[in-house]
Image: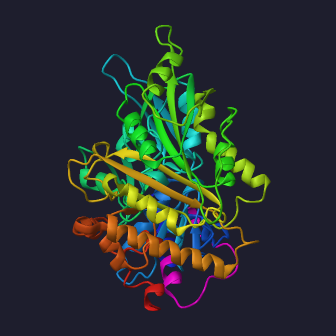
């Protein structure tokens, strides 16, 4: 055993010397024993955004958490290391956040999927799942449903890795009720930037625990997570209501999130044109008879839709239809413009998959996605909406604009995720997702460049004037990242020095610069 470990350590150091040399890898897979290090792959420089394409020098396809620890400990041990490392999950970043120019990309989906479901015993027991960081949320859902359980908090799209969403926050329509996914984690297993394998929680190694959750991959790589579970409902009553007034729309959204004992899911979107109405309805199996007049190009008319869900546990003493009627009586949607349908819990959580398959059939999935997601203070949501609708043309916009409220007290301020800095009395904030697509057949390189420039300018204006903060975002420089973190920057930087002092991890985010990296020398 000691001999095998020594050989592994020697191979890792050979790797280190190779990466630090001025010569490129030879054009064939490299054999570094159990590290399974390979020549770079096409996927390692590709993500969902299809905007940034940074090529690494090598790819690690780990077969165990030990492979990751060995790589990082070897790199960290050399003060001359110029090598950076990014963990790549399902590749759904937008701006190359999981890429590593001339570094190493760790393909987390190569880790064997490990999953153990623990069902609660007794009144006070809790149910949880121990899952590997490279597991997809759809896999967690399928396995937990076998026990009549499911995670409490989700993302809209389930083909993302556990470690990937926990490195950001993980939000969806359940966030108002249970908080983001990072608020529903009991324990983590982390490989730090120094290659140390650490188990952490709120009570054990808590500083690392809080750092990694929402930490943008800067402090460690998540190899395992313990996720809170709840009893899974049989069905979901899925409701959509349409509005022609923004104030009424947001007022009803805030009404719904004030009823967590009755409502289980709340989202919403802006209906700009026929395309946005159609694309948002692909997964909704009900017959929507909403046929709006969108006005003219000179004077467009914009509509809004609230989407909410109520879990149906098929209990004799609970009539879901009566619950929905009681809720809807308090709402002020357009007359006769409320639609509902009963779906299985699984199909409800899989709703975005239906949209994906539809777009794939049209050849519109593997296109540019210059998405922008922002957290907006309640006090600025009207101004934000006005800025947004003034800056886009309904006739030309292709995609969807999500908008729905979250509650700040469901987020843990010790974690690394950044929210708008507002008064403590303003519990409501909004998330707005401008999920725009740009088809290369109709939007050339110059067109995409202009879209990104416009988006960057809009995000900066929203930040400066309203105090909005980007989520899953990209900042043009480390200085802009400091502004993004605001008063929390010192804490974030201190944590980086503690858990990744050589600045090896997460180069694609552009928050810190490895002073020894080859790409840094070119700046």
Which quadrant of the view contains residue 446? bottom right
Q: Is residue 133 above or below residue 326?
A: below
Residue drawn at point x = 63 percent, y = 27 percent? 343
Q: How is the image coloured?
A: rainbow
- Characterize the magenta stretch by its predominant secondary structure: loop
Which quadrant of the view contains residue 409? top left
Residue drawn at point x = 52 percent, y = 78 percent? 453
Q: Is residue 11 magenta?
A: no
Residue drawn at point x = 36 percent, y = 60 percent? 215
Q: Is residue 23 magenta?
A: yes
Q: Look at the image and give the residue range highlighted in magenta.
A: 15-34
Q: Is residue 230 left or right of residue 52?
A: left
The image position of residue 388, as x and y in percent, is 48, 63
Q: Nearer the viewer, residue 508 or 15?
A: 508
Which quadrant of the view contains residue 297? bottom right
Query: How many circles with numbers are drawn on the protein?
Result: 0
Q: Nearer the viewer, residue 262 or 143?
A: 262
**Which residue is situated farthest in the top direction here?**
316
The image position of residue 213, as x and y in percent, is 36, 53
Residue drawn at point x = 78 percent, y = 56 percent? 362
Q: Nearer the viewer, residue 374 or 137?
A: 374
The image position of residue 352, as x and y in percent, is 62, 45
């Amino acid at each position: 055993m000691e001999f095998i470990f020594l050989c592994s350590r020697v191979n890792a150091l050979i790797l280190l010397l190779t990466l630090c040399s001025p010569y490129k890898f030879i054009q064939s897979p490299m054999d570094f024993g159990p590290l399974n290090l390979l020549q770079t792959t096409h996927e390692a420089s590709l993500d969902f955004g299809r905007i940034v394409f940074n090529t690494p020098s090598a790819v690690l396809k780990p077969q165990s958490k030990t492979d990751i620890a060995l790589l990082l400990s070897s790199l960290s041990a050399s003060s001359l290391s110029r090598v950076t490392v990014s963990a790549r999950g399902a590749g759904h970043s937008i701006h190359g956040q999981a890429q590593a120019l001339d570094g190493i990309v760790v393909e987390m989906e190569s880790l064997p999927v490990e999953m153990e479901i623990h069902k609660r015993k007794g009144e006070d027991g809790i149910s949880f799942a121990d899952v590997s960081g490279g597991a997809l949320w759809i896999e967690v859902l399928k396995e937990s449903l076998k026990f009549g359980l499911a995670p409490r908090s989700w993302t809209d799209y389930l083909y993302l890795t556990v470690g990937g969403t926990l490195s950001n926050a993980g939000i969806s329509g359940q966030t108002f009720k249970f908080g983001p996914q990072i608020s529903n984690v009991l324990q983590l297993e982390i490989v730090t930037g120094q290659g140390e394998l650490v188990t952490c929680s709120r009570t054990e190694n808590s500083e690392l625990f809080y750092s990694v959750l929402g930490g943008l991959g800067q402090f460690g790589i998540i190899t395992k997570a313990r996720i809170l579970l709840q009893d899974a409902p049989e069905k979901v009553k899925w409701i959509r209501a349409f509005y022609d007034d923004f104030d009424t729309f947001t007022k009803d959204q805030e009404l719904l999130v004030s009823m967590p004992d009755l409502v289980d899911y709340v989202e919403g979107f802006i209906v700009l044109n026929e395309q946005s109405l159609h694309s948002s309805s692909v997964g909704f199996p009900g017959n929507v008879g909403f046929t709006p007049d969108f006005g003219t190009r000179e004077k467009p008319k914009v509509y809004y839709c609230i989407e909410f869900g109520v879990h149906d546990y098929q209990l004799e003493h609970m009539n879901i239809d009566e619950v929905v009627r009681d809720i809807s009586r308090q709402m002020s949607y357009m007359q006769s413009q409320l639609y509902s349908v009963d779906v299985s819990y699984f199909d409800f959580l899989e709703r975005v998959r239906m949209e994906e398959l539809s777009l794939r059939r049209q050849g519109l999935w593997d296109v540019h996605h210059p998405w922008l997601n922002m957290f907006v203070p309640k006090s600025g949501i009207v101004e934000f909406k006005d800025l947004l609708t003034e800056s886009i043309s309904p006739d030309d916009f292709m995609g969807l604009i999500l908008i729905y409220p979250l509650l700040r007290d469901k987020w843990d301020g010790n974690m690394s995720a950044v929210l708008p800095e507002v008064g403590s009395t303003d519990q409501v904030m909004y998330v707005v997702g401008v999920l725009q697509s740009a088809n290369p057949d109709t939007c050339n390189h110059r067109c995409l460049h202009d879209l990104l420039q416009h988006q960057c300018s809009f995000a900066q204006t929203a930040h400066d004037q309203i105090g909005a903060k980007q989520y899953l975002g990209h900042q043009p420089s480390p200085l802009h990242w400091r502004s993004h973190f605001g008063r929390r920057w010192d804490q974030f930087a201190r944590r980086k020095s503690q858990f990744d002092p050589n600045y090896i991890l997460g180069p694609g985010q552009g928050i810190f610069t490895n002073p020894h990296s080859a790409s840094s020398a070119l700046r």
